[in-house]
Amino acid sequence: MSAFEVNFDGLVGLTHNYAGLSFGNVASTSNKSAVANPKLAALQGLAKMKALADMGFKQGVLPPQDRPCIKTLRQLGFSGDDVSVLTQTAKKAPHLLTAVSSASSMWVANAATVSPSADTADNKVHFTVANLNCKFHRAIEEQTTSNALHAIFSDPQYFTHHNALPQQSLLGDEGAANHNRLAATHGNEGVEVFVYGRQVFGGAVEPSKYPARQTYEASQAVARLHQLGDKNSVFVQQNPDVIDQGVFHNDVISVSNGNVLLHHQQAFLNQASAFSEIEHKLQQLGTQFIPIEVPTDKVSIKDAVTTYLFNSQLLTKKDGKMLIVVPEESQRNPRVWRYLNELIAGDNPIDEMRVFDLRESMCNGGGPACLRLRVVLNQAELTATNQHALLNDGLYHSLTNWVNDHYRDRVTEADLGDPSLLMENRTALDELTKIMHLGSIYSFQQD
């Protein structure tokens, strides 16, 4: 059955700031305390969405979270009205305020893992919200993320939603950032590649400097929830050495589309045997596996991390060839830019490249692939999706005007305790839920 890959990009939130919360993410920690521009960040993201939609790719939108998260602060013992809770926290526990103010939900590659109906036993699209329990500032996202996904994919005839896995280190789940899917076309049955950083039971080698966020046990649990058979799933360990060099998610070292896997030479542990298994399972489905390996002598791990070459988007064009979407940082690095030009001139399915300015997101540690959640939908499933979450000219202009009306062009850590910022955020999000017909997905709307 024919199907479409719809890229649902996350809207950057109003509290976008550089607090350096993500240990293991080199860009995040390197830019700690810099001045952020939320308005520019949101407009840069919208510009990418609009450009790809204009090229004929189907594009959706996911809303940001309510920040600062007063509900979480109440769980931590702060009391009084919302402004009192905010000011108490700013005075007594500013480190908690930065955490509950994070706009990291913009990187919706971490929002959930999604399996299309072509792969699942019940022929429904399955969503499992990521628990993100490696980082406190992200672990508090799961309920609002679940509410948003339910509001956009609401028809139980086509969509099945699973709660996040238990908030235990055994089951650390980072969503689609550690998940690739390979298939002849988006509508064909495929092989889902779950990439993990550590195996709690089994004694796998782990990184020594930075945490491995995704566990094997979590990946297996998601595969079971999604009713994936053995022929539709492969579990591969990420190379612990590259995690220690700043590759905190697999989407910083590889990216897939169709039957193509663009990956670094050092991306995976036991890479040859893993690829042999993938190739065998794809052959059983009548599909050729096309791995494209980027050699270390052309692009170092450091180059990959600083430019986010692999945190790109691979998209299938109408002619069957592929477009690679990269951030400007890739163009600025001579070695990476040389490799990209060799890639699109070479004998492989990737023959076109587009460069986007996403500097506000990149400085906080997220590139083009971090900003999108891939959802494969056939025509019936697409029709059943909330149409107000699918980008067209009208929604683009509405969201652009919304950003210009509500967002600040300067936010620092010191601004997070400003009660007016909290009110600005809620006013804006309340309006956004009306624009996108989402209902009351935020806790402040439900109180």
Image: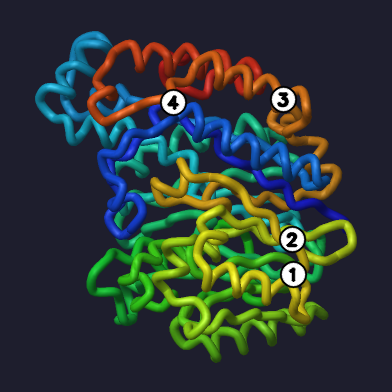
Q: Quick check: can you spot residue 147?
A: no
Residue at image position (55%, 53%) is 328
Q: Earlier in the sequence, mark 3 or mark 2?
A: 2
Q: Which mark is residue 14?
A: 4
Amino acid bearing label 1: Ile
Amino acid bearing label 4: Leu
Check disc 3 and report the residue beneath it. Answer: 395
Q: Earlier in the sequence, mark 3 or mark 4?
A: 4
Tell us which disc is closer to us: 4 or 2: 2
**From what the image shows, is residue 116 above or below residue 254?**
above
Check disc 2 and report the residue beneath it. Answer: 323
Q: Quick check: can you spot residue 368?
A: yes
Amino acid bearing label 2: Leu
Check disc 1 and report the residue beneath it. Answer: 350
Q: Earlier in the sequence, mark 4 or mark 2?
A: 4
**From what the image shows, is residue 355 above or below residue 214?**
above
Quarter of the image where the N terminus is located: bottom right
Quarter of the image where the C terminus is located: top left
Label 3 close to label 2 by CB (< 8 Å): no
- Dot 2 crowding, Cα within 10 Å, few <14, some 14–19, many 20+: some
CA–CA distance in space, label 4 to label 2 = 31 Å
- Residue 260, percent across and down? 70, 73
CA–CA distance in space, label 1 to label 4 = 36 Å
- Dot 4 crowding, Cα within 10 Å, few <14, some 14–19, many 20+: many
